[in-house]
Image: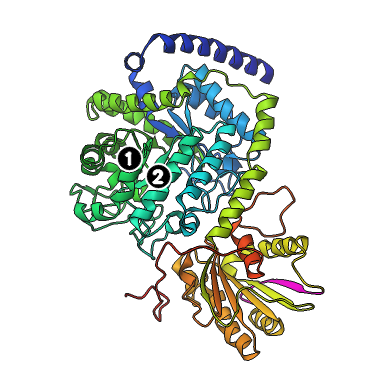
Amino acid sequence: MKKIFCLILALAVAFGAMAYAEGAQGVGLEAMLSGMSLRDKVAQMMVASFRVWQEVPPEGEDMPEEEPPKENITRLNDAIRDMVSRNHFGGILLYGQNIVDAEQTLRLIVDYQATNQAGGGLPQIVFMDQEGGSVNRIPYATQGIGNMALGATGDPENARTTAAMLAEEMRLLGIQADFAPVVDVNNNPLNPVIGIRSFSEDPRTVAAFGQAYIRGLHDAGTISTAKHFPGHGDTDTDSHTGAPVINKTYEELKARELIPYKAAIDAGVDMIMTAHIQYPQIEKGTYTSISTGESINLPATMSRTILTDILRGDMGFDGVVVTDALDMSAIADHFAVEDTVKLTINAGVDLLILPPVTDTNLFRLTQTYVDTAVKLAESGEIDEKRIDESVLRILKLKQKYGILDLTDFTVTEDKIAAAQAGVGAAAHREAEWRMAEKALTVYKNENNAFPLDVKAGERTLILFADSCASRAGTGELARQMLEERRALPEGAEIIVMKSTRDNEEECIQAAVDADHVILVHRVYNLACLDPATDDGFSSATFDKIIPAVHDAGGTVIVVSCQLPYDATRFPDADAVLLAWWGSAMRALPAEDAVWSANLPAGLLACFGQCPAEGASPVHIPALDDQYMPAKE
């Protein structure tokens, strides 16, 4: 039965592709648009994503006592095939749950395209958030050192190189669009969501690195996206979990936040992603929250003032405007689906990122979004001319990148071999390592503590805070790399430990007994700095280790492997090194595994094996007695 289905699908794709190719050659985009049904036009404005499959009862019905099983969507099931073939979504967004290996990824993407086109749809744009650094969706691809690390190198060409490498690897898999770069200005240490995803707190630095990143994506023929307009850097709330408000005037935004976006437009950025943030000084329109009943300002995603008057009118952007994901709390918790669709499209949005499917209720919601948009257009609540403007922009983007010409949706052995060889290629990883070295930033160095001067027979403790315990395998990797380089003198020993709630005395004793001490710390939110919290309890252990080691006549190096705000958390440390990122590595990785270079390079630098040439692209404030950034 499966073979018969595949044969029917292949024949349908072949005939559909022939008919489409003949039609596309004979008509322009305007004629193509005029030949589309209202439903097809609306669906062209939708980006669907299918992440996890779980069969659950419809909303309002009780869940069974035993939770239904969940399965990552790494291949299409019949329900997804039917929805894709009927709706002809303009794009598909992939997440980490969809990715296993190169061959599987290729086959999944081809299946999406073939299923869609067999149903009469135009080729889809396949999207991914592959920023590099802390936001990576392809576990076997080159990771990239992350934007703030790139900013620390001081050279925008490193951003261009990184973007080109990531894009080349995505293209080998059939992914044509990257939701990158982040060009938000990270000028608020309290920001819980941007942080090291930003190049800098200086808007002109962000502008320069953002332009370079965009050019790198274009070098590799990949669609670029500047995000999150008009700026997510100066918030202390994550729009995934709350409703951020930035109380700045338009003039204030022009002086800082909008500078990188104007630079991105000048560099030819293809898309700009909206922020689910309220700007009450700019957008006065309000809405009554469906969950709280309070009046809130329309976020930028739904603001015609921000998206049409400012972005298109004042700033001259005529590319594609895309929403951030519509499942985020700033939208989903406050706006009804019908109003979400109406307000976003009427504001000037071209592409809507639908809530990702993680169960069958969200699967049904995907269809509801399409049906609702059609109903609103039929009733005149959304002007069909407004829809036509968006669809024409999407078609132009697809034409520019050759997506409308795609007809061959097959997976060949040559394509598989090229993807397996090119994704995570050795040359790319070597380039990433060199950039990681250039990004390493010595924030402090006293008492000749950095780098270590390890002598024969001496012991070095590398202790990982609980906040970065999942990175402890990096210590094992560093030991292996040092041994391979013959960088350790005879009999020298490296001890790797993790700090837990139960082993504080053991950690202190191990530090006192060691000849050299490296403390690895990670800040992913400011609670990591506070010893009274679950995220920060290891910092109390570090507070005790540092004076104990000093009393024993030793020195301590602190290595920061994410947000740099722990640089001032341990003022008595002899040296502080900023690595800017470090991916999870619970044990020594397999020989062919891909990992981020930042933290391994940082640990090798502690032994004098890597240069540390970076300069911090953000100001690192002192902390008050509540472990919060002090006002200066």
Magenta stretch holds residue 59? no
- Does the stretch in magenta take in 499? yes
Specify the quadrant that holds the N terminus. top right
Image height check: is 332 above or below 392?
below
Q: Amino acid at mark 1?
A: Asp
Tell me the residue at 47%/16% (across/down): 120
Q: Residue at x 47, y 24 (%)?
A: 403
Q: Gap in Å between the C-alphas at discs 2 and 1?
A: 8 Å
Residue 266 bears which disc, if any? 1
Percent from the top left, x then y, of residue 273?
Answer: 36, 42
The quarter of the image holding the C terminus is bottom left
For the point 37% across and 60% down, which residue is it?
A: 201
Looking at the image, can residue 60 be seen?
no
Q: Which residues are magenta?
A: 491-502
Q: Type of residue at label 2?
A: Gln
Residue receiving disc 2: 211
Q: Earlier in the sequence, mark 2 or mark 1?
A: 2
Query: In the image, 212: left or right of 248?
Result: right
Say which element carries label 1.
helix
Q: Dividing the picture into quarters, in which one does residue 486 lie? A: bottom right
Q: Give above or below for 573 relative to 425.
A: below
Q: CB of mark 2 within 8 Å of CB of mark 1?
A: yes
